[in-house]
Image (cartoon, coloured by chain):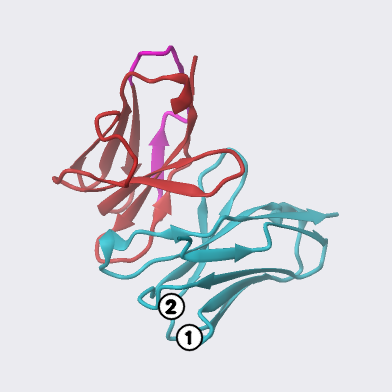
Amino acid sequence: QQQVKQSPQSLIVQKGGISIINCAYENTAFDYFPWYQQFPGKGPALLIAIRPDVSEKKEGRFTISFNKSAKQFSLHIMDSQPGDSATYFCAASMSGGSNYKLTFGKGTLLTVNP
Amino acid sequence: GAVVSQHPSRVICKSGTSVKIECRSLDFQATTMFWYRQFPKQSLMLMATSNEGSKATYEQGVEKDKFLINHASLTLSTLTVTSAHPEDSSFYICSARPLAKNIQYFGAGTRLSVL
């Protein structure tokens, strides 16, 4: 049973465009929702994260939108750049539960064309 | 801050040998460390969770005698792949969770190739 569903599987965006990646979760006990960026051959890097008490969080060109009632959250990358080309993973965890294990989505391969 | 160092970054070994991978939190104490395996173009698969001074908790289907985990201090965890075989070839990644925080920081990963 996949608890975090991520879409699309791949995404191609032109430079300067907006990249949008969506995730949906099932477990209402999740209270921490991070996004990770992974370049080939490297470990994932924490990009931005949100908790369910806010509906949006922005850090630079990256914004997370969170809809608690719909159990969905999304990553928006504004003014996408070729250097943003990477695989993005959404994840979810619950504080104190199971040692804070992360449940990952399957990932989205983002390609930003120059 | 929040740097996790993983070593080695790449290792090639012969079938039947054992390989040890180290994961260190450089600037924070890690209550919990996690070990993942990642196949090409796939998501991260959690192998085990380790808490300092305790036995690791392995996910279903992961052989504990094959993948030995030691978490001897709040800054160091090791994964030993025992009697490695070609099917163990993969990308192994560790992560560390700081004390009293629900955040995981990842190492750069180790590419294991078993010949």
Q: Is residue B37 left or right of residue B20?
A: right
The residue carrying mark 2 is A51
User: What is the spatial separation of the Cα atoms under label 1 and label 2, in whole angstroms?
Assistant: 6 Å
Marker disc for residue A54? 1
* Residue B38 pos. (x, y %): 50, 41
The chain holding disc 2 is: A
Marker disc for residue B110? none
- The chain assigned the colour red in the figure is B
The chain holding disc 1 is: A
Q: Using the image, determine if residue A85 lies above or below residue B102.
A: above
- The chain assigned the colour cyan in the figure is A
10 Å crowding of disc 2: few (<14), some (14-19), many (20+):
some
Q: Amino acid at mark 1?
A: Val
| Residue drawn 41% across the image and 54% down it | B105
| Residue drawn 16% across the image and 43% down it | B55
Residue B4 sits inside the magenta stretch: yes
Q: Is residue B52 left or right of residue A109?
A: left
